[in-house]
Amino acid sequence: MSLDEHNKDRVAKPHDRLALALAEDMAAVNTLIRTRMASEHAPRIPEVTAHLVEAGGKRLRPMLTLAAARLCGYDGPFHVHLAATVEFIHTATLLHDDVVDESAQRRGRPTANLLWDNKSSVLVGDYLFARSFQLMTETGNMRVLGILSNASAVIAEGEVLQLTAAQDLATDEAIYLQVIRGKTAALFSAATEVGGVIAGAPEAQVKALFAYGDALGIAFQIADDLLDYSGTTASIGKNTGDDFRERKLTLPVIKAVAKADATERAFWTRVIEKGDQHEGDLDHARALMTRHDTLNATRVEALGWAARARAALDDLPAHPLRDMLNDLADYVVARLR
Amino acid sequence: MSLDEHNKDRVAKPHDRLALALAEDMAAVNTLIRTRMASEHAPRIPEVTAHLVEAGGKRLRPMLTLAAARLCGYDGPFHVHLAATVEFIHTATLLHDDVVDESAQRRGRPTANLLWDNKSSVLVGDYLFARSFQLMTETGNMRVLGILSNASAVIAEGEVLQLTAAQDLATDEAIYLQVIRGKTAALFSAATEVGGVIAGAPEAQVKALFAYGDALGIAFQIADDLLDYSGTTASIGKNTGDDFRERKLTLPVIKAVAKADATERAFWTRVIEKGDQHEGDLDHARALMTRHDTLNATRVEALGWAARARAALDDLPAHPLRDMLNDLADYVVARLR
């Protein structure tokens, strides 16, 4: 295709349209991030942070904050601080996640724990958490501080819960929802909610922004967990079957375990609880999911959460950014069709 | 000795006198800590936290906050929140430190990373950081939030600096001071400063409280680093020589390296930079410190910082708690005489 068509295709993605609409704000966010990740005394900090922050992540979370603030009519300076706060919390979480998961790759590049060491990832993550609290404190808005400190606690609690729920076949859909709220949705919903709060939006709009971020995050994570079984390595940009090998209890597995007969249950006990996995086990797991239609049932749940995200937007003022958020909710589950 | 004499001796220690004078407040702090370390969903969190929080630490940092607030005449409820905040930050730091240092023992008990795993220590530490920010946010005092978020950044920065400064003979006394400010003094000074701020104390008193905590923390850490070479295993409750084996550039070593001739420098390069340590090396290191009188010079610096801590108290109102803080500054260096 021609360059024009290529650009049109790029711009057609809701994420890229958001990036274009918020380009000026995002430039300010990136400048603030670069300034605040500096450390006069410990050059290791910006080295490690830059490796992750400048690795070409989509900056989805800070854009949610900016979009929420702008569509509620905000024209002050602090949405930029809050967007940078959200990105710092996200980056700190990624650094610690990679230590906990002993990951070697993220976004197609070696992880910081591999390039430097676990120590640097733990301590630089702590530094970014502290920096994020400094940034949010500068807004002088107590309600925003409450929302973001609560979100941080929910995130950490979700991670610990995931740690203890993994490899345990008793993990049910309610626990799964709690885990992914902590892992993904809590920061999405805090990102959108604080955008509304800093804009001084009416309470109904703040609630709608929270509900949108929460449902978007859940849809996003369910889609991710589904694609780990139903996608192709090329389409999802990482190896499929990682969750299976790591014995994570994600929704497609939980649904299959719930419908398992005695023989199937013995299989899940062996591969997930005991971690005794052989060649062909992943294919057999996929076959069981197909037998019980759990991949499709998981897809339906993801689409349902995306629909909830779109519905939440009804309580927000009409605005081009609202339309982009609407399309974004479609987009995170579009890969599943 | 009789039980009475024993009790008298106990109560004579400034730390125990502070604990007696602040007993009611400390009971409230302990209740708040127990409430906030709970997690409805992830029982691993209170398990790991309790292991550390209830291990019989001295609770020195929260007592500093309570004492500062009380001696400035505070009679509201929030000094308890701030004291619990400070203890949570300290506990989170210990959890992450033990992962970074790969420690197996703390306060004579196995560390959490050994009893559970590194993952739990990292994530429960993150949870306690988040909880600490929730607690401080509840005070509604923006200045307090600024002080504690800055202190958190200085602490994390100091830890990263220590990581890169270790094993590097170019580390000088200025870098050492920065490291121990981050490692110890930043939380001491924030603990005392926020006590004054929450009490609405005049600016000169707030400054004095900061200066006291800063100097006390520095004296405390220099004493600790000195005793690792000059103390006995029985007197310091842990093995002497740990810093040597971990190749840490502490003040006694830095001073010895600064006075080293070519042969001595080769020794330090081998044992600290290259980590090539043999039997007798620790004794030889001690002999070099004696030759250049660096153990004594380090002691003099610790005494100097303790004196600065006492002098800072002059700007505070006369109060029995002030006298105890004065004695505490003596006490942290008394082991060195």
Image (cartoon, coloured by chain):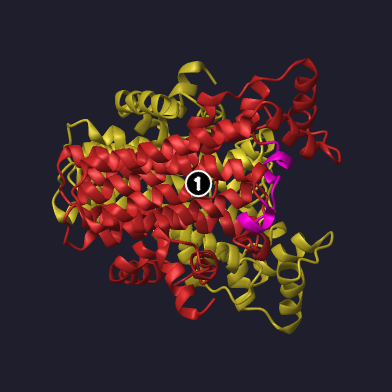
Chain colours: A yellow, B red
Identified at 51% across, 72% down, the residue is B43
Above or below, B307 relative to A219: above
Amino acid on which disc 1 is placed: Thr
Give the image location of residue B109, x and y in percent: 64, 65
- Seen in the picture, residue A251 relative to B233 is either above or below; the reply is below
| Residue at 53% from the left image edge and 64% from the top image edge | B52
View extreme (bottom): residue: A262
Please identify the quadrant where the N terminus of chain B is shown.
bottom right
User: Residue at (37%, 30%) from the top-left corner?
Assistant: A19
Q: Is residue B82 left or right of residue A36?
A: left
The percent position of residue B40, horizontal first and vertical second, equals 43, 73
Instruction: Check residue B287 for magenta coloring.
Output: no
Q: Which residue is mark 1?
A: A93
Percent coordinates x, y for residue A54 in the rendering: 51, 27
Q: Secondary structure at mark 1?
A: helix
Q: Is residue A62 visible?
A: no
Quarter assignment of residue B316? top left
Relative depth, front residue between B6 and A133: B6
Asked if residue B55 lies left or right of residue A13, the reply is: right
- Residue at horizontal 46 percent and vertical 68 percent from the top: B9
- Characterize the local packing of mark 1: few (<14), some (14-19) or many (20 or more) Cα atoms within 10 angstroms: many
Q: Position of residue B330 (x, y in %)?
A: 42, 48
Region in magenta: B232-247
Q: Chain of mark 1?
A: A
Judged left or right of residue A205, residue B209 is right
Q: Is residue A291 visible?
A: yes
- The one of B290 and B149 positioned closer to us in this rendering: B290
Quadrant of the rendering where the C terminus of chain B is positioned: top right
**Front in this rendered view, residue A326 or A101:** A101
